[in-house]
Image (cartoon, rainbow, N blue to C red):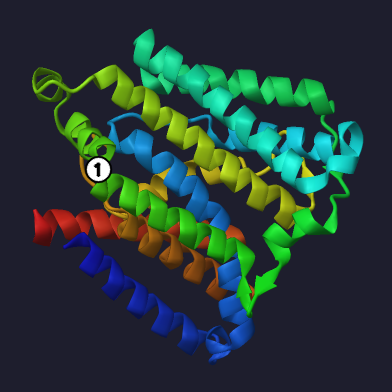
Amino acid sequence: MQIVALMVLLGVLFALMAFLTQGKLLEAQSFQAIAFQMPLLGLLTLAQMGPMLSGGIDLSIIATANLVSIVMALSMTQFFPALQAPFAILLGLGLSLLLGILKGFFIALVSVPAIIATLGLMIFIRGLALVITRGYVIAGFPPDFLFIGNGTVVGIPVPFLVFAIFASLMYLLLSRTQFGLELYLFGSNPVATLFSGVNNRKVVFRTYLLSSFLAGIASCVMASRFNAAQADYGESYLLLTVLACVLGGVSPSGGSGRVWGIVVSVVVLQVVATGFNLLGFSSHLASALWGMILLGVVLFNRLFLA
């Protein structure tokens, strides 16, 4: 039922923003702007979704994305410039998997609470990124890498295609595989899941490995979109990923939530941001409205869907 409420909310907000912007939101360039800007938050939210489905959270996804971006940037500009973008992307995604293994080790095997483990790793990863860059921006990437964040295929922005592909794969993973079923079961009741013969540690380990990998995918879009990499890019996205997950129907206690709810929630947030940008309003006002939308949806669920 929450997806229906979100669709209604999206329709109302879209009609309202189209009216307030005197139809500018309906122009082709506005749709293209949404399609370029939405995927980064969408990919990071998908990275946050798995941990939240397990009843945990990953506070290190932005730090992971930034460190991966920095490693890719150094590969393309200093260490292996002749190998260009494909090698840099493989190197970055390999690093994201290593960081996912590190998260999985602490959370699944050592049984450190997810919020503590990922907080510690966030500080460690961000500090490492600052040591590597000394706080400077690394820029100047080759055209084939910049195409990921700024190119189009038959008029469709490449970042949107990347988000659509990984959202579809995430949907299939969660709804059509044994891992997806075990993740939902674990998030609902880890004790019952354990007694049903599921290896809980393996489920948690794979969940944070997946989260880190998706953060690596997001870093490719982020670095190519900005044509730069830095230790503290996108830090405001961390809480937005939690907001988008909850708005999309992912339970903070775990066990429930669907990918399509995430997709709709991200579109809702981006429509508000784009509409406010067209109106010339402050981005901080858009952030305030995002919070009110979340509270409104939660209140609606409590009053009418509980």
Q: Secondary structure at mark 1?
A: loop
**x and y, in percent, of residue 43 in the image:** 50, 50
Residue 9 vs residue 274: left or right?
left
**x and y, in percent, of residue 272 in the image:** 48, 69
**x and y, in percent, of residue 225 in the image:** 71, 57
Could you tell me which residue is drawn at 20 percent across and 29 percent down?
A: 186
Query: In the depicted view, which residue is nearer to us: 223 or 97?
Result: 97
The amino acid type found where label 1 is placed reads Ser
Could you tell me which residue is drawn at 79 percent across and 52 percent down?
A: 227
Residue 90 shows up from this direction: yes
Residue 5 vs residue 31: left or right?
left
The residue identified by callout 1 is 251
Q: Label 1: how many residues lie within 10 Å, few (<14), some (14-19) or many (20+)?
A: some
**Quarter in which the N terminus is drawn:** bottom left
Residue 66 shows up from this direction: no
**x and y, in percent, of residue 121 in the image:** 55, 19
| Picture mark count | 1
- Up-down: is 245 above or below 202? below
Could you tell me which residue is drawn at 45 percent across and 48 percent down?
A: 45
Query: Looking at the image, which residue sits at the far top?
Result: 110
Residue 196 vs residue 115: left or right?
left
Query: Looking at the image, which residue sits at the far bottom?
Result: 22
- Up-down: is 273 above or below 221? below
Could you tell me which residue is drawn at 42 percent across and 29 percent down?
A: 208
Q: What is the quadrant of residue 128 in the picture? A: top right
